[in-house]
Image (cartoon, rainbow, N blue to C red):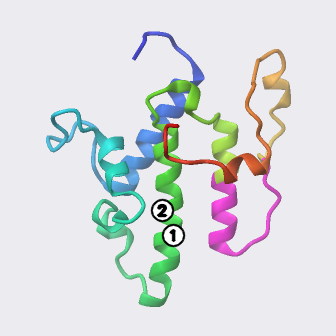
Amino acid sequence: MGGKISTRGDVYSYGILLLELLTRRRPTDKMFVEGINLPKWASMHFPNKITEVVDNQLLRNVEELNKVMVLGCLSEFMQIGLICAREDPHQRPTMVETVQRLEKITSVFLGIPRAFHLPIDISPLLEGTSNPRNTNEENFESWSTSTS
């Protein structure tokens, strides 16, 4: 929004895309008026009223026994979307952190233990870039949708 191009804008776009997929709503939906946008609307219902914003098709044909697990997974994905779509670019995670968080959620949901890493070595791409963020696993535990 400030006119400066950065990868943090890509993270924002990814967050919006993830929220679109989960809610089946577009950011340009006519329901978003008077300062309410897709991330604000989703965060108003997160985490206690997630069933009111998640696309019902995602819960179709889910057995009652699995519904809690599926809702937990969808909640985790929504949290990633909300964090990536934060208004302040400096509060957004990097895409590397986001992918690592997605891998963690996927492995827990599928019950497959995995090492949390990207499938390719991207360290040569990161050389010469300044990345003050800590990308270790403990950092993911501190992710929060709050802006404080």
Residue range of the region highlighted in magenta in the rendering: 102-117
Using the rendered view, name the quadrant where residue 132 is placed: top right
Whether 60 is drawn above or below 58: the answer is: below
Point out residue 115 in the picture as x, y percentages from the top left corner.
83, 58
Label 2: how many Cα within 10 Å (few below 14, some 14–19, many 20+) = some
The kind of secondary structure element at disc 1 is: helix
Q: Is residue 16 left or right of residue 125?
A: left
Quarter of the image for the N terminus: give it.
top left
Point out residue 42 in the picture as x, y percentages from the top left corner.
34, 50
Q: Amino acid at mark 2?
A: Ser
Q: Considering depth in this image, is 116 or 119 the residue closer to the camera? A: 116
Q: Is residue 66 left or right of residue 43?
A: right
Whether 143 is drawn above or below 124: the answer is: below
Using the rendered view, name the quadrant where residue 33 is placed: top left
Label 1: how many Cα within 10 Å (few below 14, some 14–19, many 20+) = some
Point out residue 113 in the picture as x, y percentages from the top left corner.
79, 69
Identify the residue at image location x=19%, y=40%.
32
Identify the residue at image location x=80%, y=63%.
114
Identify the residue at image location x=51%, y=42%.
83
Whether 111 is drawn above or below 39: the answer is: below
Identify the residue at image location x=59%, y=23%.
7
Q: Amino acid at mark 1?
A: Gly
Whether residue 109 is in magenta: the answer is: yes
State the separation of the CA atoms marked 2 and 1: 5 Å
Q: Considering depth in this image, is 91 or 16 the residue closer to the camera? A: 91
Point out residue 37 in the picture as x, y percentages from the top left corner.
28, 38
Q: Which residue is mark 2?
A: 75
Q: Which residue is mark 1?
A: 72
Whether 90 is drawn above or below 30: the answer is: above
Q: From this viewpoint, which residue is outermost toward the front?
A: 148
Q: Is the Cβ of the residue at disc 2 closer than 8 Å to that at disc 1?
A: yes
